[in-house]
Amino acid sequence: MTYWNAQIECMDRETLSQVQLEGLQATLNRVYKNVRHYRKLFRGIDFMPEDLTSLDMLQQLPLLTRRDLSRNYPYDMFAVPLREVVRLHTTAFNFEQPVVIGFTANDMANWAELTARNLAGIGVTREDVVQIALTFGIMSGPFGIQLGAEVIGASVIPISAGKLREQVKIMRDFKTSVLISTPTVALGLIIAMEELDMDPHGLTLKYGVFGAEPWGEKTRQEIESRLFISASDTYGLTEVFGPGVAWECPAKKGLHIAEDHFIAEVIDPATGEVLPPGEEGELVITTIGKEAFPLIRFRTGDLTRMDRTPCSCGRTHCRISRIFKRCDDVLVVRGTSVTPDQIGRILARVSGEEPRFQMVVDREENRDQLMVAIEATDTYFFDEMKKQRRFVEHLHREISEFMGWEVNIRLVEPGTFDPYQKVVDNRRFE
């Protein structure tokens, strides 16, 4: 079994709990002193950081939402002066309800450590060539993977996403042994190889790490059988770090949370009650090592189960089940997060008012497809089909540009869908 930091990854539970308690106490003191949002929350419940003497007391603190983070845009959630921040990211390419995340030099070092654990855990060494086929930009994802691979000493190809035919040629010629991408991109690379009549047996690929969108065992089996690799899942959130929050070990029986950096809870999304291991609920994350952008009881919106039973890999950190569903109206499609509110604002901007609409996601030929169905009222009936077509084309252009890929737009008759059900996800992952 391969570990990057066996002393920490296999730490006994009693010592790990003490590490968490000390990290939590230090974090609470820092945010109370430096972040007005937390100071106001704590005073509202008559709580002082020194009051916390056990990890169970964390449950007494209020939950944090993305809306809270957005309200404090851009820097009001930072716990250090801006001069100490060496990297800035945001949660999306668009700036609808933006959140800015800062990293100090120590944060960057910790991020590299976490992603190195992820990569080393599946067998990556300094002998490997790592091809990162994720979009490099204002979002954090691929940068953390690059940091971890470079700490290990592997050779890195930061190729970004897109241009699949060129990607497979580079994969062959540069002797890529590790592929990092979304599952959708991996399946696209397989199709590109077939179009180029390229035999995957001729590649040097051994491992694949896939994330940024939900994917199930059927997709894993297809990727593994057609690329002849071992495919593993990874989990992260830009608000927390990006990749490196949790990852699959070779046992592939859940994703290990890095508990020396995060305290994970699973709550009932409706009541906020903390649920016992094994019950499905919303994942809540508290950071205990981040300097610039610490989060206390952050609601991720992701539904999962906690597993604290021993893992055959020897790691003692708890595991979460793979994440396929959310408890909010956020859709994650092709690695992009989108909400009905965001689509509604685009529709209102184009048409002058927000119509009734529904977002429908299907999976066709191993690729997510998003369709926005719009209820056709008098406002959207035109005396000429040409005008109606131009209107739909305008909506298609605006929404597709917002998403970064093609979105289908359809005008439908009134009563076609439930107007209160804004999101329909027809994908099946489990």
Image: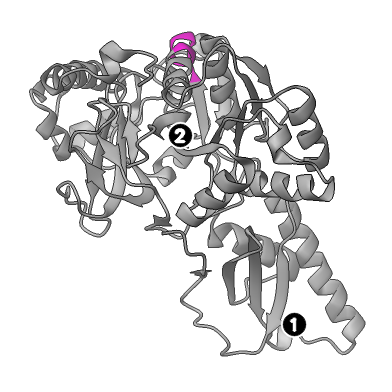
Q: Nearer the viewer, residue 163 or 245?
A: 163
Query: Residue 116: where, in percent of width, then height?
Result: 46, 18
Element type where label 2 sits in the image? loop
Give the main secondary structure, helix, strand or loop, of the magenta stretch. helix
Query: Residue 414: where, in percent of width, then height?
Result: 61, 89
Query: Residue 389: where, in percent of width, then height?
Result: 86, 77
- In the depicted structure, whether residue 292 falls above or below residue 378: above
Dot 1 surroundings within 10 Å: few (below 14), some, or many (20 or more)?
Answer: some
State the extent of the magenta-drawn residues as a range: 103-109
Q: Which residue is mark 2?
A: 239
The quarter of the image holding the N terminus is: top left
Please tell me whether mark 2 or mark 1 is closer to you in this view: 2
The quarter of the image holding the C terminus is: bottom left
- In the depicted structure, whether residue 407 falls above or below residue 264: below
Report whether residue 85 is seen. yes
Q: Which residue is mark 1?
A: 380
- Rounded to the nearest angstrom, the CA distance separating label 2 from label 1 is 39 Å
- Direction from residue 376 to residue 192 in the image, left or right: right
Identify the colour scheme used.
one colour
- Direction from residue 305 to residue 167 in the image, left or right: right
User: Residue 259 in magenta?
Assistant: no
- Disc sitting over residue 40 in the figure: none
**Residue in view at x 58 percent, y 70 percent:** 360
**Residue in view at x 76 percent, y 22 percent:** 174
Dot 2 surroundings within 10 Å: few (below 14), some, or many (20 or more)?
Answer: many
Amino acid type, residue under disc 2 in the picture: Glu
Amino acid type, residue under disc 1 in the picture: Tyr
